């Protein structure tokens, strides 16, 4: 099945109707689970292992539950404030325990890399960043922008390796910025070295006076609805000989993908761009190299997060989630199980991560 937007109007409408039916079925299952349906994890996983290959291989158009998933949106990032409320400003004690919070590796909310022999989550995140250092050709003395910097894990690790690298981090999550401000006062953290500048703000409004040698963006473009505008912005922040590395969840199908469940409960207006979306939306920047990282890496990462999430229940259940913890827990178990299983579908060959090295066009 090819790109759904290239179909005849009748075929397109028929696909849209079927996509709505698939989405309604997934939402019914999700909401039954959230409301207490007892379904063992193994049954959940085999349901997905049976259905997802059919969708990926024969009916990818059905994986786009809404029209906005297929096209660029008006603003660079949609629903930013709602996204912070639903996801990134949740109790950090819960997120930090799930993601891991170590001496140099701070919570990192993106895949680890397990193909170089990592035996635990912390190591997999180090290996992931080591690979990005190589691919972005980071040199000591570079000034790097981290566009959507999370808790400052990537800047902290890279600054621990390069004594003269400077970082500027941009993030809209107030809670994550508070974590970094605390580290900026902690003498044991590289964020306190005077080489890290933090901007709490929205990608949509980002402006910088200085231009950067390198720009990194890790796991953020699933929240970007307009890549063309995003690349135009990044190009304006980049020195003439600068380089950009975009690390993104991606799908090797003709169209983009999302799910009604994640849109409603986890990542409002989140989507996975198809693997060709970065090069095909690059106007101000050009793609000079690209890599596909097999989805088993994210499967292992999400499995580790689910284990840690389950283990931390006692210590995090009394935090404020805006809803009863039992309901919150079921929403999050559904999320971690769903994504963890989908990344492993077809041996990780369809849903994984893409990395793209860009320079000025
Ligand atoms: C999946 S996390 C990845 C974080 C970090 N890059 C990492 O690898 O750990 C996405 C990050 O993008 C930030 N973000 C999402 N939408 C944003 C927006 N509109 N403006 C600024 N930051 C945003 C989130 O707060 C979060 O820190």
Image (cartoon, helix red, strand yellow):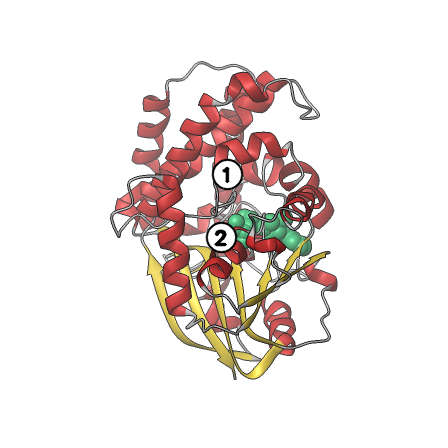
Which mark, residue 225? none
Q: Quadrant of residue 238?
A: bottom right
103 to the left or right of 131: right
x and y percentages locating residue 316 in the rendered image: 58, 22
Residue where numbered disc 1 is placed: 101
135 to the left or right of 222: left
Task: Give the SS element for disc 2.
Answer: loop
Q: Earlier in the sequence, mark 2 or mark 1?
A: 1
Cα separation between marks 2 and 1: 27 Å
Density class for disc 1 (Cα within 10 Å; few <14, some 14-19, many ≥20) is some
Asked whether residue 119 appears in the rendered view, the answer is yes
x and y percentages locating residue 213 in the rendered image: 55, 76
- Residue 258 vs 358, above or below: the answer is above
x and y percentages locating residue 136 in the rendered image: 43, 70
- Which-is-in-front pick, marks 2 and 1? 1
Asked whether residue 31 appears in the rendered view, the answer is no
Residue located farthest toward the front when viewing the structure as drawn: 187
- Residue 279 vs 70, above or below: the answer is below
Question: Residue shown at 40%/48% (left/top)?
Answer: 125
Quarter of the image for the N terminus: give it.
Answer: bottom left
> Is the residue indicated by label 1 positioned so its CB lies within 8 Å of ligand 1?
no
x and y percentages locating residue 68 in the rendered image: 61, 54
Question: Residue shown at 48%/43% (left/top)?
Answer: 103
Density class for disc 2 (Cα within 10 Å; few <14, some 14-19, many ≥20) is many
Residue where numbered disc 2 is placed: 272
Q: Nearer the viewer, residue 64 or 220?
A: 220
């Amino acid at each position: 099945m090819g790109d759904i937007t290239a179909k005849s109007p009748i075929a397109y409408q028929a696909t849209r109707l079927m996509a709505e039916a698939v989405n309604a079925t997934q939402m019914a299952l999700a909401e039954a689970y959230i409301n207490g349906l007892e379904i063992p994890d193994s049954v959940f996983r085999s349901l997905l292992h049976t259905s997802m290959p059919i969708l990926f291989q024969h009916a990818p158009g059905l994986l786009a539950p809404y029209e906005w998933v297929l096209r660029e949106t008006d603003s660079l990032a949609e629903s930013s404030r709602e996204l912070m409320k639903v996801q990134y400003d949740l109790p950090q004690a819960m997120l930090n325990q799930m993601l891991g919070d170590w001496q140099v590796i701070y919570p990192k909310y993106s895949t680890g890399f397990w193909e170089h022999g990592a035996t635990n989550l912390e190591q997999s995140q180090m290996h992931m960043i080591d690979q990005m250092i190589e691919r972005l050709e980071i040199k000591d003395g570079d000034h790097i922008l981290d566009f959507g910097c999370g808790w400052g894990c990537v800047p902290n690790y890279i600054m621990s390796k390069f004594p003269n690298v400077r970082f500027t981090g941009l993030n809209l999550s107030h809670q994550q910025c508070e974590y970094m401000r605390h580290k900026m006062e902690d003498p044991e953290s590289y964020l306190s070295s005077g080489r890290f500048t933090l901007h709490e703000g929205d990608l949509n409004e980002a402006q910088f006076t200085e231009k950067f040698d390198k720009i990194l963006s890790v796991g953020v473009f699933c929240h970007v609805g307009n890549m063309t505008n995003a690349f135009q912005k990044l190009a304006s922040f980049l020195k003439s000989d600068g380089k950009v590395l975009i690390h993104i969840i991606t799908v090797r199908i003709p169209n983009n993908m999302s799910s009604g469940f994640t849109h409603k409960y986890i990542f409002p207006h989140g989507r996975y761009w198809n693997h060709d979306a970065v090069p095909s939306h690059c106007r101000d920047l050009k793609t000079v190299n690209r890599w596909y990282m097999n989805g088993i890496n994210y499967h292992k990462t999400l499995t580790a997060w689910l284990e840690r999430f389950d283990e931390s229940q006692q210590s995090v259940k009394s935090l404020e989630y805006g809803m009863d913890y039992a309901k919150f827990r079921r929403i999050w178990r559904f999320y971690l199980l769903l994504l963890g299983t989908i990344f492993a579908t077809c041996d990780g060959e369809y849903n994984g991560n893409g990395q793209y090295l860009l320079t000025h066009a």
